[in-house]
Amino acid sequence: MSKVCVFDHPLIQHKLSILRDKNTSVKEFRELISEIAMLMCYEATRDLPLEEVDVETPIAVAKCRRIAGKKLAVVPILRAGLGMVDGMVNMMPNVKVGHIGLFRDPDTLEPVKYYFKMPPDIKERDIIVVDPMLATGGSACAAIHFLKETGAKHIKLMSIIGAPEGVERMQKEHPDVDIYVAALDEKLNEHCYIVPGLGDAGDRIFGTK
Ligand code: PRP
Ligand code: URA
C-alpha cells in the first residue's frame, strides 16, 4: 500500500488558506500554486540519496554531501499541473520536464492521451507527477498508467488538494506510488469537484473563467 503524506507545515497551510479563497486574484493564485509546489518539493525530495564530496573552501577541505546524481523528472498533467512546474524547477534547476495531456472521451468516459512528451530516458528516472487536484483520481491514475507503459518504475504523485475518493482509487490502481498532498479534503460534490477544495484549478491559474 502506498504512503499518503499530508504536509502540515505552517507556511504551506497559510498559503493554502489564501489559495482556497474565492476572492484571490489570478496573479496571486498563480504565485501561490508555484510557492506551495516549491515547499512541497522540498519535503517530497527528503529521501534523495547523498554522496560525500570534498570541497576546498578558502580555509580548508570540507567534507560535504551532494545529491548522488539521481536522475529526476517532473511530469505535469495538462493543464493545471503546469502551474506547479516553476516551483519545482526553482528547487531543482536541472530537472527534466515531461508533459502529459489527457481528456475524457465523452462517449466512453475513458481518459484519452492527447499529448505525451517525455525525456528519452524517462524509464530510468525518478518521476514526480504534479497536478494540483486529485479528485476522482481518474486523471492521475491514467497519467501514471501511461508513464508505466514506458517502463517508468519510480513514481510519486504530488497534488495540492486530495479527495478521499481519489486517494482510494490511486492506492488501489497504483499501490506503489506514494501520494503527497497539502490537504486531504472532505469529499467530492455531484460534479466531482472537491469540497471544500478551491474550485477549478486550471481556470483559476489561467484566468479562463
Ligand atoms: C483537473 C485537475 C486534474 C483533474 C482532477 O483538470 O487539474 O487534472 O481535474 O480530476 P480527477 O481526479 O477527477 O481526474 P481538468 O480536467 O479540469 O483540466 P484542466 O487542467 O485543463 O483544467
Ligand atoms: N478539478 C479541479 O480543478 N477542481 C476540482 O475540485 C476537481 C477537479
Image (spheres, rainbow, N blue to C red):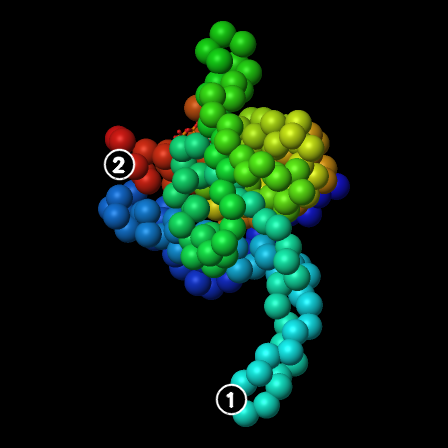
Marker disc for residue 139 = none
Residue 156 in picture, x, y percent from top left: 62, 44
Q: Nearer the viewer, residue 203 or 163?
A: 203
Q: Which residue is mark 2?
A: 207
Q: Amino acid at mark 2?
A: Gly
Marker disc for residue 58 = 1
Q: Is residue 12 above or below residue 154?
A: below
Seen at 26% across and 31% down, the residue is 209
Within 10 Å of disc 1 (Cα), the crowding (few <14, some 14-19, many 20+) is few
Q: Amino acid at mark 1?
A: Pro
Whether residues under marks 1 and 2 lie with C-beta atoms below 8 angstroms apart, the answer is: no
Q: Nearer the viewer, mark 1 or mark 2?
A: 1
Q: Earlier in the sequence, mark 1 or mark 2?
A: 1
Residue 1 in picture, x, y percent from top left: 75, 41
Instruction: Answer yes or no: is residue 38 visible.
Output: no
In what quadrant does ligand 1 lie? top left
Instruction: Answer yes or no: is residue 93 visible.
Output: yes
Residue 64: quarter of image: bottom right
Q: Is residue 54 above or below residue 162?
A: below
Residue 94 in picture, x, y percent from top left: 50, 54
Within 10 Å of disc 2 (Cα), the crowding (few <14, some 14-19, many 20+) is few
Q: Secondary structure at mark 2?
A: loop
Seen at 48% across and 34% down, the residue is 99
